[in-house]
Image (tube, helix red, strand yellow):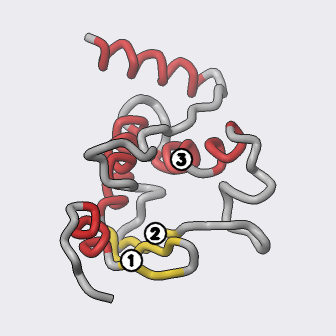
Amino acid sequence: MHYTASRAFIAKVAAAGGGITAGTDTPTPGVTPGYSLHRELELLANSGLTPMGAIQAATRTAAECLGRSADLGTIEPGKLADLLVTAGSPSTQISDIRRLELVFKGGVAFEPSRIIMARRGVKTGQ
C-alpha cells in the first residue's frame, strides 16, 4: 500500500514539475554504495520519471538540493564527478544502470566486482 501511494505521489510531483531527489546512496550499514541507488532509480522511473529524470534525481537535482550545484551534479570543466561506464544506455533504459563496466571515483577507475568484494571485506589486491 505504501509503495502504491508513493508511486502516485512521485508521479504527481513529477507531472507538476517538482524536484525529486534520490537518496538511498548514503553510508548505511549493509548497503553497498551505488547499488541501492540503482534500484531506487528503477523505482523512480516506474513512478512517473523518465529514465533521464531518474538519473538527474541522483545527480543534478541532488546537487541543487545540497546547495552544491556549482561544483557537483553535472559533468563540466572544473566540477567534481564520479562516473559510471555502462554497457547500455541508462538514459533511455534505466535498468542498464546495472550493466556496469567501470566506476570512476576520485579520478580512479574501479571494476564493479572489486567494489562489492571490498564492501564484503574480501581483499582483492591492487
Q: Position of residue 15 (x, y in %)?
A: 58, 24
Above or below, 44 relative to 36 = above
Q: Position of residue 85 (x, y in %)?
A: 43, 74
Alpha carbon separation for disc pair 3 and 2 = 13 Å
Mark 3 / mark 2, whichever is N-terminal: 3
Q: Report whether 121 appears left or right of 69.
A: left
Q: Position of residue 16 (x, y in %)?
A: 63, 21
Estimate how packed mark 1 is, as few (under 14), some (14 to 19) or many (20 or more) residues with alpha carbons within 10 Å. Answer: some
Alpha carbon separation for disc pair 3 and 1 = 18 Å
**Numbered label attached to residue 58:** 3
**Numbered label attached to residue 84:** 2
Question: Do the numbered discs 3 and 1 sit on residues whose CB atoms are within 8 Å?
Answer: no
Above or below, 50 relative to 82 = above
Disc 1 secondary structure class: strand
Disc 3 secondary structure class: helix
Mark 1 / mark 2, whichever is N-terminal: 2
Alpha carbon separation for disc pair 1 and 2 = 6 Å
Residue at point 41%, 65% (across, down): 89
Q: Position of residue 97 (x, y in %)?
A: 37, 59
Estimate how packed mark 2 is, as few (under 14), some (14 to 19) or many (20 or more) residues with alpha carbons within 10 Å. Answer: some
Badge count: 3
Q: Report whether 56 appears left or right of 75.
A: left
Q: Quadrant of residue 73?
A: bottom right
What residue sits right under mark 1 in the picture?
A: 102
Disc 2 secondary structure class: strand
Question: Do the numbered discs 1 and 2 sit on residues whose CB atoms are within 8 Å?
Answer: yes
Mark 3 / mark 1, whichever is N-terminal: 3
| Foreground residue among 39 and 14 | 39
| Foreground residue among 125 and 53 | 125
Above or below, 20 relative to 56 = above
